[in-house]
Image (spheres, rainbow, N blue to C red):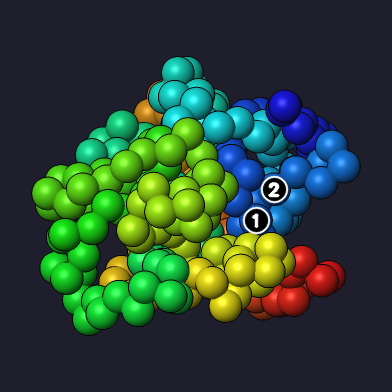
Amino acid sequence: MSCLTMLPASAGERLDLATEEYPPYQMSERGFVTGFVSDKLREALGRAGLEARFDVLPWKRALQFAAARSGQCVYSTTRTPERAARFKWVGPLAQSEWVLYALAERRLSIARLEDARPYRIGSYNGDARDTYLRERGYTVETALDDLSNPQKLLSGRIDLWVTDRYSTNRFVQQNGWRDSIVPVLRFRRVDLYLACHPATPDATLQRLQAALDAMRQDGTAARIEQRYANWPER
């Protein structure tokens, strides 16, 4: 189900922002789109005098939404070579650390990414990690969403799960899997962005970028992230 939020703006300009459920980066709570990246964007949009609508969708649909027409955007997005020319970019909004997880009982020894070649790796539809591994010849099994992968790992349908360290460590702990599902390799760190349809006016996105830059300089961005330091116990 979509969750929508409106921000008023005197300028009358509007961006439609799509994202996915990926706490604590972005998530829906009681009909409101929150998470520390969403909160950063909401603050920046207000500073830039822009009206905004936030919509939570499955990730592949969110990417398609941003590619459909001017003024439509998606976040939090990895700027891959394949995506770079398809969108205009604002950010970075956050960083993501890519990690392989496995069942603790299997005691897999993976010192580098190449060691994962014999294994089935779980990812999800439209994810940049999925594309990254497939392009390098790894065996990747794609789920409809990332939340399906821990169950696939626990049931032996995949050997490894490629995901984000920050969100997954908390998700695993929240579900009581801390002793069962463990990180075995951290292999890449990437910046995350807002990606907008290429026809979106440059002046609009430049104002938003300037607001984000000012938030980093005045400490607002760091304070927003700190509010989620103990998520989900906030």
Q: Residue at x 54, y 72 (%)?
A: 180
Height in image: 1 above or below 5?
above
Is residue 133 in view from this perspective? Answer: yes
Residue 33 or residue 232, whichever sits in front: 232
Q: Residues within 10 Å of mark 2 (few under 14, many from 20)?
A: many
| Quadrant assignment, res 30 | top right
Mark 2–mark 1 contact, CB under 8 Å? yes
Residue at which label 2 appears? 27
Quarter of the image with the N terminus in it: top right
Residue at which label 1 appears? 23
How far, Cα to Cα, is label 2 from label 1? 5 Å
What residue occupies the far right of the structure in this picture? 30
Q: Position of residue 98 (x, y in %)?
A: 38, 65
Height in image: 13 above or below 106?
above
Is residue 196 in view from this perspective? Answer: no
Q: Residue at x 82, y 71 (%)?
A: 233
Q: Residue at x 67, y 32 (%)?
A: 55
Q: Which residue type does callout 2 highlight?
A: Met
